């Protein structure tokens, strides 16, 4: 007679073995988070690398050089790793979250500062950086993590910033500056050279940046946020 297969709940079944392995891996991650001091959490180490690469780019004699561009790109690219890493290894900390957003806003202002010919655009982004950093210093968290908001903040933050106003904001603070830097490096154009179409999108993005800056300073309207 053919031997019967182990029951799914049996200690020797493949299903049970996989469950044990999964629990063991999860336990190891929790243990790692418990053993390491929070300054040495992997997401925070990634944050330190982000700061180092950002500062190194800012110290370049030519702020729009190829080396500076790749250093800034690396710093911003790591922004897409530290958050998932923190959640995967149960290493979310207030320090890491603030470090992440401080680095974001300093990087964004620097990109606008070195590539924009518009004094208004630079001033708007400087104000946004100051407001963002001041807000985080006072509240201990980023705008999006507050319990309330208003029409403008909800509009920009909807679907986790995947919407048209947020895209214009990102164009103004990140994408357009990098496009200008790439043309400067590859085509020899001035780092702040532009076209009418780029200027239009840049102006629209600057308007979103200004609106968002003002909106986060206003009291919440009592409605809950979506897409957090």
Image (cartoon, rainbow, N blue to C red):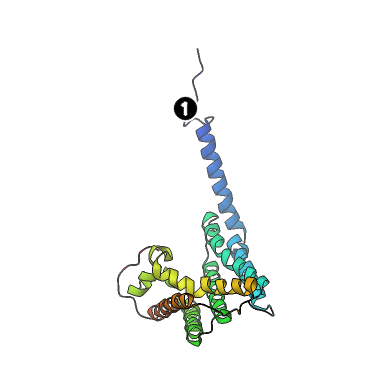
Label 1 secondary element = loop
Q: Position of residue 13 (x, y in %)?
A: 52, 30
Q: Residue at x 51, y 87 (%)?
A: 119
State how many labels appear.
1
Decide if residue 152 is on the left or right side of residue 133. Answer: left
Q: Residues within 10 Å of mark 1 (few under 14, many from 20)?
A: few
Q: Residue at x 46, y 75 (%)?
A: 197
Closer-to-camera residue (11/136): 136
Decide if residue 45 is on the left or right side of residue 94. Answer: right
Closer-to-camera residue (163/157): 163
Q: Position of residue 32 (x, y in %)?
A: 60, 54
Closer-to-camera residue (112/190): 190
Q: Which residue is mark 1?
A: 7
Please tell me whether residue 43 is drawn above or below residue 196 in the rendered image: above
Q: Position of residue 117 (x, y in %)?
A: 53, 84
Name of the residue lying farthest toward the top:
1
Q: Position of residue 109 (x, y in %)?
A: 54, 78
Please tell me whether residue 63 is drawn above or below residue 38 in the rendered image: below
User: Which corner quadrant of the image does residue 34 belong to?
Assistant: bottom right
Q: Residue at x 40, y 71 (%)?
A: 165
Name of the residue lying farthest toward the left:
222
Image quarter in which the C terminus is found: bottom left
Name of the residue lying farthest toward the right:
61
Decide if residue 17 is on the left or right side of residue 214. Answer: right
Q: Is residue 142 visible?
A: no
């Amino acid at each position: 007679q053919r031997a019967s297969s182990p029951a799914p709940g049996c200690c020797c079944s493949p299903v049970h073995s996989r469950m044990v392995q999964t629990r063991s891996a999860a336990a190891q991650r929790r243990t790692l988070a418990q053993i390491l001091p929070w300054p040495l959490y992997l997401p925070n180490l990634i944050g330190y690398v982000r700061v180092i690469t950002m500062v190194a780019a800012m110290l370049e004699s030519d702020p729009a050089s190829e080396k500076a561009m790749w250093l800034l790109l690396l710093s911003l690219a790591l922004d897409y790793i530290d958050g998932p890493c923190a959640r995967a290894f149960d290493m979310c900390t207030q320090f890491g979250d603030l470090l992440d957003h401080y680095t974001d806003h300093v990087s964004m202002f620097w990109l606008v500062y070195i590539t924009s010919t518009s004094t208004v655009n630079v001033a708007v982004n400087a104000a946004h950086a100051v407001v963002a950093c001041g807000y985080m210093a006072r509240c201990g968290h980023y705008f999006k993590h507050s319990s309330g908001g208003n029409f403008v903040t909800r509009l920009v933050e909807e679907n986790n910033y995947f919407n048209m106003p947020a895209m214009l904001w990102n164009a103004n603070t990140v994408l357009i500056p990098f496009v200008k830097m790439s043309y400067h490096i590859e085509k020899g154009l001035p780092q702040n050279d532009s076209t009418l179409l780029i200027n239009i999108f840049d102006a629209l993005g600057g308007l979103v940046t200004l609106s968002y800056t003002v909106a986060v300073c206003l009291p919440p309207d009592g409605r809950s946020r979506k897409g957090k």
